[in-house]
Amino acid sequence: MAANEILIVAGDVSGDIHAANLMAALKEQKPSLKLTAIGGPRMRPLADQFWVDLASQGITGFVEPIKKIPALAQLLKKIRIYFETNRPAAVITVDYYGFNYRVLRLAQKYNIPCYYYVTPQVWASRQYRAKRLAALTKKMYVIYPFEPAFHQKFGGKAVFLGNPLLDKMPSPQEKQYPSKADANYTWKLGLLPGSRPGEINRLLPVFYHAFEQVLMHYPNAQAYWFALPQADEKQLVALIGEKPSANFHIIKETDYKIRSQMDYLLTCSGTATLENALLGIPMLVAYKMFFPTYLIAQAVVKVDMISLVNILANKEVVPELIQHKATATTCAHETLEMLNHPQRLGAMREQLLQLRSSLGEPGVAQRAARDILTDLKL
């Protein structure tokens, strides 16, 4: 067994971020540790060996991953050979249940201890997976305070050390909205249609055309698409079918400096909603899925709301527009309702900031790294 080596696996953009932070913390606390990684561009420079960029491929849903089966099968074969020849001291999986479940099963076959950092949200759908995770992991590091009790019901050892988003999120900025509707006010609207290609293709045109409708009422309004590094105006034009307004801007940032200045956000369901809440920025949440995926999701999802903000608050703090309701007209209507009544923005902001205090303190990756290394006696 390679007593000084750990395999860490992530498969999407947010998992890449959290895994990279954990890798940095592991290296800081034990510089001699060797990390083999499967994940994304943030993990790559921290790894002693980096195999595959899964995070940038956007493999998600129920139906879409089918076409990726041959490539994933080859990767699993490579992992099996690695386990046979190297036998790392541990495996750490990060979110991304479908593929990581198979990695965990392989590791169990070779008696390699496994840890799950940022456990998948099995409480929301397919809860039988919690029992599987309990049987395959030595410990799970969950990101919401209610999750340890949930996993305990299925025999899992889960600990809440805080939400890892707190390790990278800045403190909320002071914010003041107009006292009443003002047609000449320069509203700043952020558009976050998601990080996966399918999400962007489905939601960016909706958000952009909603912004066009807002411009009819607030001609000074500015919109900002918070885009991935590879995005450009050509991609935007291809999706919206026209040259964008001069009031529209493409933003590529990693420090939240511009996003934190937004007045209102049109955002895809997912991690971004919680990021926005931690910044205290009012929002609407929209989600459109590949239709077969949507039909399956209706059958398996066990929660009434899709936004993490609403789930944590156990009430509708932010509006949700799902599938056929996520149109440019409905998004524009919800946005104008807020801009026409600025006091609603302030009220929503206060509710969002209350959530921040329930998610722990920064230093989550450091605490998790320390716990894993102590548990492994490394």
Image (tube, grey):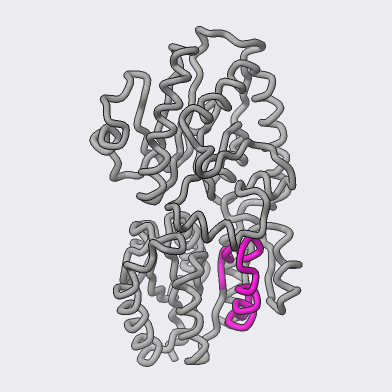
Considering the image in quadrants, where does the N terminus appear?
bottom left
Q: What's the residue at 60%, 76% (across, down)?
A: 133
Where residue 181 sits: x, y (%)? Answer: 61, 11
- Residue 296, compared with residue 214, is above or below; it is below
Residue at 32% over, 44% down: 229
In which quadrant is the C terminus drawn? bottom right
Please give the count of numbered marks on the rendered protein: 0
Q: Quadrant of residue 42?
A: bottom left
Residue for point 56% across, 67% down: 117
Residue 261 seen in this snapshot = no
**Residue at the spot 50% in from the left edge and 41% down from the top edge:** 324
Looking at the image, which is closer to me, 252 or 203? Answer: 203
Q: Is residue 106 above or below residue 218?
A: below
Q: Give the x, y percent position of residue 213.
A: 45, 20
Location of residue 136 by image quarter:
bottom right
Q: Residue furthest left?
A: 234
Asked if residue 48 is positioned above or below residue 301 in the image, the reply reads below
Q: Is residue 133 magenta?
A: yes
Q: Nearer the viewer, residue 355 or 375?
A: 355
Q: In the picture provided, is 303 more to the left or to the right than 245?
A: right
Percent position (x, y) of residue 360? 69, 52
Q: Is residue 324 left or right of residue 178?
A: left
Name the spot of residue 65 as percent of width and height, x first: 38, 65
Left or right: where 98 falls relative to 317: left
Any magenta on residue 330? no
Task: Specify the segment rendered in magenta.
Answer: 116-139
Res 349 → quadrant: top right
**Does residue 229 appear in the picture of this structure?**
yes
- Report the front residue among 27 and 204: 204
